[in-house]
Amino acid sequence: MPTPTTSREPGQPDLYAPLTGVPLTHGQLPRGAAVGTLAATVAAAGALVLFGDWNVAATAVLAAVAYTVVVYVWSRAVEGRRKAVDRLVTAVVTCAFLLALLPLISVIITVVSKGVARFDMEFFTYSMRGVVGEGGGVYHAIMGTLIITGLATLISVPVGMLTAIYLVEYGRGRLAKAITFFVDVMTGIPSIVAGLFAYALFALIFGPGIRMGIMGAIALSVLMVPVVVRSTEEMLKLVPNELREASYALAVPKWRTILRVVLPTSLAGIATGVTLAIARVIGETAPLLVTVGITSSDNFDPFDGRMATLSVFSYYEYVSPGYPPEPALERAWAAALLLIIIVMLLNLVARLISRLFAPKTRG
């Protein structure tokens, strides 16, 4: 059988001719080249900070730029333009992530190194009554923080949950839109504004100069309510409409459907949102400075007189340390470390609640 031939016009390339001079493969960097380069850059930056007395922030930025340039140039020379651009973007994202972590790591190292010295039994079991100089503790501030935050939670959770239920299940028209708008506005108000609101409210009733724990609880509840509303609203929206319709088909009233079907299904998400809202406000200082103040003695009555909280205690110990200042500064850093631990534990509890109480699905 004769071999088929193809005709081509003069000047047209021969498509059947073998390709010559076109590389079909590119080189490839060694495995772990990017990680090794990053480790070498970080080590060099650490050496400059430790032995060269360089500024940490400037050295970190310089190391990020150097790592990005080295990886790109190396990849461009070995792997080609396309792979080099991919490695460039990966390097930029990695450096941005590490630079964002740098302040957090710096804060944790500073607070732990300066606050762990006062983590003793006296610090957790004694107040500051009659203490001048060394000694004393934050027992009164711990109890005040728990009482005020607990009252704020009791105020915020029912209001926030009922508002979210109305918006998702009943809300229609202008009223629902107005509530949604004001919830969005409340989400972004400064914390000091919440404190001034609570102070003005009680000053109109009891006169100027009033300080009580319940005032701090109301100020914190102003900050908590929009968080609870938003988290609960989103969780309720995730409940499938088929569950509601099945309940209505069985002639179950709407209120009972919400109580027995919708809320249990979204309980894990709601509990997680409430826990995160508590973690959001437990470290607030500005509203408690205005409404609660500080005291060196035990006062566990939120309706009578000033109370101590961990955030305000840490603030006053740091700005007014007295003489000698070292004991007060140690107490301030220890109180800040305790607050960080409490917030971290609350976030872990939120994750645990979300995992344990989430609706079970069959695989």
Image (spheres, rainbow, N blue to C red):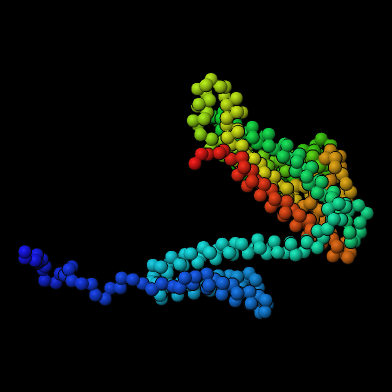
Residue located at (67% from left, 44% from top): 275
Quarter the N terminus occupies? bottom left
Residue located at (72% from left, 36% from top): 155
Above or below 132: residue 161:
above
Quadrant in the rendering for residue 152: top right
Viewer-closest of 356 and 87 = 356
Q: Residue furthest right?
A: 130
Residue 136 location, x and y as percent?
88, 56
Residue 154 location, x and y as percent?
73, 37
Above or below 250: residue 219:
below
Quadrant in the rendering for residue 101: bottom right
Residue 257 location, x and y as percent?
57, 26
Viewer-closest of 344 and 362 = 362
Viewer-closest of 310 and 363 = 363
- Whether residue 9 is visible to the viewer of this picture, yes or no, is yes
Tag count in the figure?
0
Quadrant in the rendering for residue 322: bottom right
Residue located at (18% from left, 68% from top): 15
Q: Residue furthest left?
A: 1
Answer left or right for 121 relative to 287.
right
